[in-house]
Amino acid sequence: MNKYLLFVFLFLIICLSSCKSYGPTTTFENTAPEGIDYGNLAHWAAHPDKRDNSDLIPGSDAAPALNLAADVFFIHPTIYNNKGKNLAWNPSISDSVLNNRVDNSTIKFQASAFNAAGRVFAPRYRQAHLVSYTTDDKASAKKAFALAYSDVKNAFEHYLKYYNNGRPIIIASHSQGTTHGGPLIKEFFDGTPLQQQLVAAYLIGIPVPKNYFERIWPCEDPEGLNCIISWRTFKSGYIPDDRPIGDDILVTNPLNWTLDTTYVSKVRNKGAVLRNFDKVLPRRVDAQIHNGVLWANKPTFPWSFLLRTKNYHIADINFYYMNIKLNAKRRVDKWLEARN
C-alpha cells in the first residue's frame, strides 16, 4: 500500500475518534423536499439493478454470486462530517461529492461484506450531521435524526413493495445506520409477520440494549435466526466513560458469534480489510466481550504504531470483515434450509 495513503487512513481513525466535529450552528430548519423518490436508482448507493461498490470482493476481480435468494438492506454510517459555515443539519440527497465519499468508503468497505449473503440494497438518505451526536442543541439534533429516519423508512417501504416478494432479509447497519436500524426493526419486524423473514440483524457500532425489542432476541450462536447481533470495538483494557456500558448492552463476539465473555484468539479471525481493499489480513484482530463493549488488542499492520486511539469504532466491521461475510451467508443458508 502507498505509505502516504496509509498515513492518511491512520490519521482519519485518530481524528474521527478524538477531534471535535464542526457542523451546523443554527437551529434546525427543514427546507428539504418532503420525500425522496426511491424509484430513482440514483437515490441508492447500492442496488442489484446497477453496478456499485457493494459488488466488490477484496483482492479479487470476481463478481458476486448471481441469483441470490436473500436480500441485505444496509444502512450506512455518518459520512456527513463537513466543516464550514451555515451547514445544513441534513445534506441534499443529490450532493455528488458526499455521495462519492459514501460510495468509496462505507459501501465499498462495509456493505460489500454482505454481498455473498444476498442482493445488497443501500439507500442514500439525508443523514444527520456527525455533530448531531454531541451538540447541545438536542432539539435540532432530534429533528435531523427524524428526517434521516424518514428517508430510511421510505426506502425500506419502497424495497418491500417492489423487490422483496417474500424473500429473506438481513438488516445490516453501522453507527448512525444503527441509530435508524433499531427503530426500523421495531416498526416493521418486531412481533409482525415480517419477523419470520428476518434472517438476522447486524446492528453494529451503537449500543443496543438486550431487551430493546419485545419479540426479537440476541443471536446466541453462529446459526441463530430472527435475532439481532451487535458490538462496539475498543482497545483491550479500555472502558469508555461517555456511552452506555454494562451487561444490559448486547455484545456479540464476531469471532465465535456467541455472547460468551471468553477470550477468542486472532487465530480465528478469517481476515480484516482495512485501507487497502485488495488486501485481506487474516489473524490480525482478536476479540473478547467485556462489560458491554468488545475488546480487541491493537492489530499489527504496516505503520500500525500510529494507531493511538482506544476507540476502534471506525473499524467495527473492517476488523472482522471476512468473519461477517461467512457468517451472513451461513445464516441465510440455514434460513433457506429451515423452510425447505
Image (cartoon, rainbow, N blue to C red):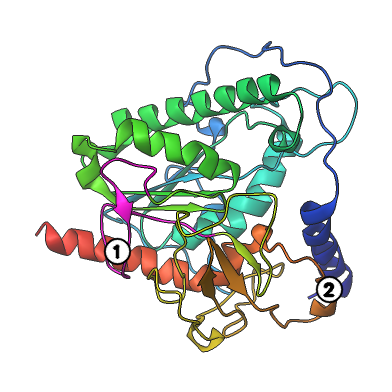
In this picture, residue 185 sits left or right of residue 29 = left
Whether residue 329 is situated above or below residue 94 in the rendered picture? below
Report the residue marked by disc 1: 331
* Left or right: residue 168 compared with residue 26: left
Residue that appears at 37% across and 38% down: 185
Magenta span of residues: 211-231
Nearest to the observer: residue 306 or residue 163: 306
Residue 97: name its quadrant: top right
Closer to the chain start, of discs 2 and 1, is: 2
- Pick the quarter of the image with the C terminus: bottom left
> Residue 87 sits in which quadrant?
top right
* Residue 110 vs residue 119, the one in the foreground: 110
The amino acid type of the residue labelled 1 equals Arg
Of badges 2 and 1, the one in the foreground is: 1
Task: For marks 2 and 1, give the CA distance.
Answer: 37 Å
Disc 2 crowd, CA 10 A, few/some/many (<14, 14-19, 20+): few
- Is 78 above or below relative to 12? above
Q: Would you say residue 168 is visible in this rendering? A: no
Disc 2 element: loop
Image coords of residue 264 (percent x, y): 49, 82
**Numbered tag placed on residue 220 in the rendering:** none
> Residue 107 location in percent, x, y?
58, 51
Q: Furthest residue to the left?
A: 340
In the image, is residue 268 above or below residue 114? below
Looking at the image, residue 43 sits to the left or right of residue 119; the answer is right
What residue do we see at 54% from left, 69% from top?
290
At x 47%, y 26%, the residue is 38
Q: List the residue tagged with mark 2.
A: 2
What secondary structure do most residues of the magenta stretch adopt? loop
